[in-house]
Amino acid sequence: MKNALKRLKRVLDLEASQGYKNKAVVGGIRQFATFWVGQAREAAQTEMDKALVEQVAEVLTDYGRLPGTEARAKVIEQLQSKLAQRREQEPAPIKSSAPPAKEPAKPVETAASTPPPTPENRKPKPNVRREPLPPRNKKPGKWERRPANRKPVDPDPEGLAQSVTAVHGIGPKLAEHLAKIGASTIEELLYIFPRRFDDYTLMKPIHKLVYGETVTVIGTIWETRARRSRNNQIIVQSIISDGTGKVQATWFNQKWLVDKLKAGMQIVVSGKVDQYLGRPVFNSPEWEPLELEPLRTRRIVPIYPLTQGLSGNRMRDIMRKTVNYWARRVPDPLPPSVRQRQKLETLPEALQQHHFPDSQHALHQARRRLIFDELFLLQLGMQGFRHEWQSQPGVEIEKDTAVLTQFQQSLPYTLTNAQQRVIQEIADDMANSTPMNRLLQGDVGAGKTVVAAAALLLAAKAGYQSTLMAPTEILAEQHFKGLRPLLEPLGLRLCLLTGSTPTAEKAPIYAALASGEIDLAIGTHALIQEAVSFHNLALAIVDEQHRFGVDQRQALRDKGPASGEYSPHLLTMSATPIPRSLALSLYGDLDLSILDEMPPGRQEIKTRWIRTRERERAYAFIRKQIEDGRQAYIIYPLVEESDKVDAKAAVAEHERLQGKIFPDLQVGLIHGRLSGSEKESVMRDFYEGKLNILVSTSVIEVGVDVPNSTVMLIDGANRFGLAQLHQFRGRVGRGQYQSYCLLVADSDTPDAEERLSALTQTNDGFALAEKDLEIRGPGEFFGRRQSGLPELKLASLLDMDMLKIAQTEAQTIAEADPNLEQPEHALLRQRVAKFWQNAGDVS
Ligand code: ADP
Ligand code: MG
């Protein structure tokens, strides 16, 4: 190490004496750094020396980029003084074979670089997370919940959970910008991936340039001039020569370039070759001085997502620093066996290459690894949940065909084939001692309630209790009202329990649930409060899965018989149609039931796409419907006017509609900024007919069933996705009256046009889901809010091959170690928890 340090000192001194021209070593200081770091890394023995090497590496790599003598001098001085410090602290040579003396504990600090996470300086850092990430709700998530008889693992030995400000060059201001694109910690920053890459690896001599080609040219600047164009733009033009020919490069409105691009300078230019008067030219190409490390020319250049106040070059610079230092410190959660089997590279490699790829092949490999990770974590989470739910036996509930027949005969209509099939699937599951964990999908109006009723009836007839949970009080009440006439005549005892159940009524309900007097409890989260205990809960039905997080499902499970020795059978109902192919590959064949057939005689909702100037006519139509005693919804995309989107805002529009268009009617308003209880109260007024018209943003989506409402007017319909539009439409046509959906678009992009005309053509939710997937791609289709699944950054759920591989590998692991309790899975367990942290927890 001593020799390496000596060499470094000589170079630093020489550079200082030459006036910081970056000429102390042929090829520049950066060149020296590459060479020196290689040797020094090997020589460094102590943690402190290792840290020193990395600091020096970082500083010297940047040296050539520093803007002037002053900045360079400062950096060199800092390094020199650090070396001096190091010499003072050098322990006296030890002759015996005893281990070297421990380094002094005082960490080396510089203003110029990130203190690397040596054991000495890591511990006291206040913002390093010691615990697994805090769960969002006070209760721990399922992955944290298991009793820990394992050794506690340091969740962040490298300090990756530090704030991004720990990276040299990121201050509080920039940290704010980065937070906007989703990066508060270093680790999160590493996962801000480029939107795309520009490939400038093709190098050509100037006389070989071809129009339209994206290439890199290296040459010398002959001259640079600035002039003003006719429309008053400043145009900077350089003539670049490489001995084979000359090419002109032009930049617009960057006057300062005149001083930068001096004649004689060696420059690298990357971009698309244009032509002007028959000659090849570059317009606004990327450029860099030749002596710098290639960052935006002659390589595959990452193009990052930007926010205001953060330029592409700045972002690239930050990412290079972050990736160079931190990527190789990211621990790889993937068991080596999986990595080898699937021929995946390590996580540090993949992160490095997915930011600054060495080649297209390297980029492809990196992408493959990162996509695998996402799908693998997704599958591990889903399978882990299933395994955990099924790790304890369920209660076998007899599939009593006599009961089912009696039930069918009691109905005023015949069940559809789909309903009959699904009831059989559910009854088969419940007859099994492995607890059911089934997802029931069916479009709005497909008749899920009656299917649920059949299952609830079977449980009650076998002597067990069941529960049905809904995300809002109104929905719970609706279920209560819908199920009571189906089940009470058959002898079931029902109760409704929500947050607003009067306290006086709660005590008797609690008592009746505990004693088993009540067969079926319908309600909201109030059902999984501490105070509630069941006598023998054997079936739980959860409505609208994406409103329930993992924690709530866990709490539900804890209400099972003998508090957790059994798991109740679980049926989740969702009205968000997922294309069948997708659903099957995600959930597997066994656990999914699809109601893909509508009850007969359903009135079709008439859907019209009208012009903006027909709005007044639409209002007149609504007025007519209201005069006939009906109600209407009017939907707007946003809550308040925004500069960016000139959409009609619900608040302003509500004022206008109430004041000018419908002054004599009751117009209500609901939007996302209202509290839960405010929303409920507006919904209730509409539900009870106190409001004629309800103006709303998309919060109405999973809403109430108001059979009296017959018009759904969606203003700015082009701004919503197809699946969402279909959900809106499903709010009407729920009673005996002919219903209408009117779409007004404020612009007509081809995409919007395709969506809106698809909507006017069919009422089939599954067909529309397929179409939506086709138009928008799975990333958007599976917006988190829609699906209850974690967000995927790179992976596509349509990548069936990768999904299969991830599924198989997850299965292997989940079978051997379902709760990821083995020490070699500790990291994986953390990652799964983090990946799933916010999924499905939408309010
Ligand atoms: P969703 O799947 O949206 O929950 P519901 O269960 O609320 O649908 O059913 C919508 C309406 O269709 C209800 O009024 C219900 O009585 C009716 N219904 C359900 N099944 C049938 C059927 N097989 N034939 C006729 N009407 C049905
Ligand atoms: Mg329903």
Image (spheres, helix red, strand yellow):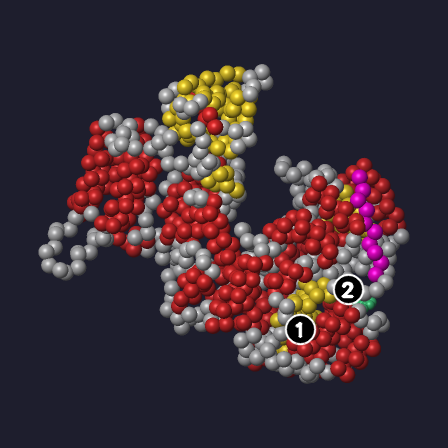
Q: Which residue is mark 1?
A: 467
Queried whether the magenta region covers residue 679, the answer comes back as no
Q: Quadrant of the C terminus?
A: bottom right
Whole-percent x, y for residue 694 in the image: 76, 50
Please name whichever residue, 144 or 640, is drawn nearer the observer in this view of the structure.
Answer: 144
Residue at 40% across / 66% down in the picture? 824
Q: Which residue is mark 2?
A: 597
Q: Which mark is residue 585?
A: none
Check disc 1 and give the amino acid type.
Thr
Queried whether the magenta region covers residue 607, the answer comes back as yes
Q: What segment carries the magenta color? A: 602-611
Q: Mark 1 Cα within 10 Å, few/some/many (few <14, many 20+)?
A: many
* Image: 350 above or below 173: below
Residue at 20% across / 56% down in the picture? 102
Quadrant where ligand 1 appears: bottom right
Please name whichever residue, 106 or 314, is drawn nearer the observer in this view of the structure.
Answer: 314
Whole-percent x, y for residue 646 in the image: 67, 37
Check disc 2 and give the amino acid type.
Glu
Whole-percent x, y for residue 167 in the image: 38, 44
Q: Is residue 16 left or right of residue 442?
A: left
Residue at 49% across / 38% down in the picture? 199
Residue 508 visible in the picture: no
Quarter of the rendering containing residue 767 = bottom right
Q: Is residue 139 left or right of residue 658?
A: left
- Between disc 2 and disc 1, the foreground one is 2
Query: In whole angstroms, how far apart are the C-alphas of marks 2 and 1?
Result: 26 Å
